[in-house]
Amino acid sequence: MATGIPPQVNARQARAGRVLRRWKLWLVPGVLSALVALVLSLLYMGGILTPADDLHRMPIALVDADTGPPLPGQSAPLGAELTDAIAAGTPPGQVQWRRVSRAEAQDQLSSGKVYGALVVPEDFTRSVAALTTDQASARPVLLALTNPGAGSLASSLAGQITQQAAHRSSEALGKRLTAAAPDAPATSKLLLADPVEVRVEPGHPIGRHTGLGLSAFYYTLLLVLAGFLSANLVHNGVDTALGYADSEIGPWHTRRPTVPINRTQTLLVKMAMTAGLAAVTTTMIILATVGILGMDAPHLPLLWVFSFCACVAVGLGVQAINAAFGTLGQLVAMFVFIALALPSSGATVPLQATPSFYRFLGAFEPMRQVAGGVRAILYFNAQADAGLTRAWLMILLGFVVALVFGFAMTFYYDRKGLHRMVPSPS
């Protein structure tokens, strides 16, 4: 039976089993696959397993608004004593208690500078004094304020810290009150043993359509992925169109005539296309998240501009890395913009609850900077000091680094005569 394949071609075709027996074929992909799996596992799991044990200077406001008057035998209202004990009783280095006024605490909550607050209200000493009299009408209250805009886990960790500190203060105060009233009735002693009510309230509420403070993270992830994937699509598409890579779709394989163009001009084409397509991807992300799904976005024009610039910065960075590293560029870019960026973004697990390696990465990794700007726009009224100024500066720095690094490498390769391929005749 005729096969339609010339005998000389058919004789040269290799069998899969024979190819698979070549150990060198397995070596490079095997080693790279093992290393990538190992490093990704260490990076992703290493940053989330023990957030409570890795706490490092988590910022929490501590407010003493107690106006007294002092209890008999005391020189100051109980609030001063209580906040001093809380600040001194926390393990060193874990929490950064910021001793501020109530107005300052609210300002820092509203700009994402603190993850929570513990407030001693104005009537605290009066309420405590009333417990030992027949004028007691309610338990004294300590306010534990959360900040969901800082991230659900960050707000939860801060809430746990403030509530634990408040309960410890209640127990210590209860021992003093019980010792001072040995003849109190049994029911009163139960109240005096744990006299303080800890009331948890949101210090800076956010909208309902925010994923409990996770919308900023997932939106940031969309921006980074869009910039990363779009840049790689442009990279591969341009190489195919210029004849430097094959096009294979299903059974159809083509190769275009090679266009004589140097590396620098090729990179210029890729970067220009990446920047242009960023407007399309940004618009689609806004359309899907805000227009269709209804995500809360109070500053929509600013969000679009910021998102566009973030996508462009990521895309230009990917193109620069691809130009410098060639075939390995996509793997290197994946580590720079995805693998290293996700666990150091501070968008799910706050950096203050991660090992020091991730805090170091968070100082410059792109996703961390973009997440800060997105969070400021979505949750903190686009305040400059809520992380938006830093985000803009880091995006600008990303532009500069990508352009300088990318074109410096391609210019060097061109000067050295390291051409990608000898042009073939049309």
Image: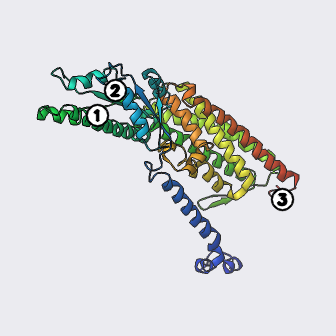
- At a point 62% along the width and 73% down the height, the residue shown is 26
- The residue beneath circle 2 is 78
Q: What residue type is labelled 2?
A: Leu
- Residue 412, compared with residue 288, is above or below; it is below
- At a point 41% along the width and 27% down the height, the residue shown is 63
> Picture quarter containing residue 180?
top left
**Secondary structure type for disc 1:** helix
Residue 113: give x, y in percent of width and height. 50, 31
Quadrant holding the C terminus: bottom right
Q: Residue furthest front?
A: 73
Residue 142: give x, y in percent of width and height. 32, 29
Give the class, few, some or many, for how many residues have Cα within 10 Å of label 1's Cα (few <14, many ≥20).
Answer: some
The label number, if any, that marks residue 422 in the structure image: 3
- Residue 94, compared with residue 122, is above or below; it is below
- At a point 65% along the width and 36% down the height, the residue shown is 394
Comparing 223 with 236, the one in front is 223
Q: Which of marks 1 and 3 is nearer the N terminus?
A: 1
Comparing 357 with 187, the one in front is 187
The alpha-carbon separation of the residues under discs 1 and 2 comes to 9 Å
Q: Earlier in the sequence, mark 1 or mark 2?
A: 2
Give the class, few, some or many, for how many residues have Cα within 10 Å of label 3's Cα (few <14, many ≥20).
Answer: few
- The residue beneath circle 1 is 173
CB-based contact (under 8 Å), mark 1 and mark 2: yes
Asked whether residue 208 is in view, the answer is: no
**Secondary structure type for disc 3:** loop
Quadrant holding the N terminus: bottom right
Residue 418: give x, y in percent of width and height. 84, 57
Q: Which amino acid does label 1 sit on?
A: Leu
Comparing 227 with 164, the one in front is 164
Report the side of 277 relative to 199 (left or right). right
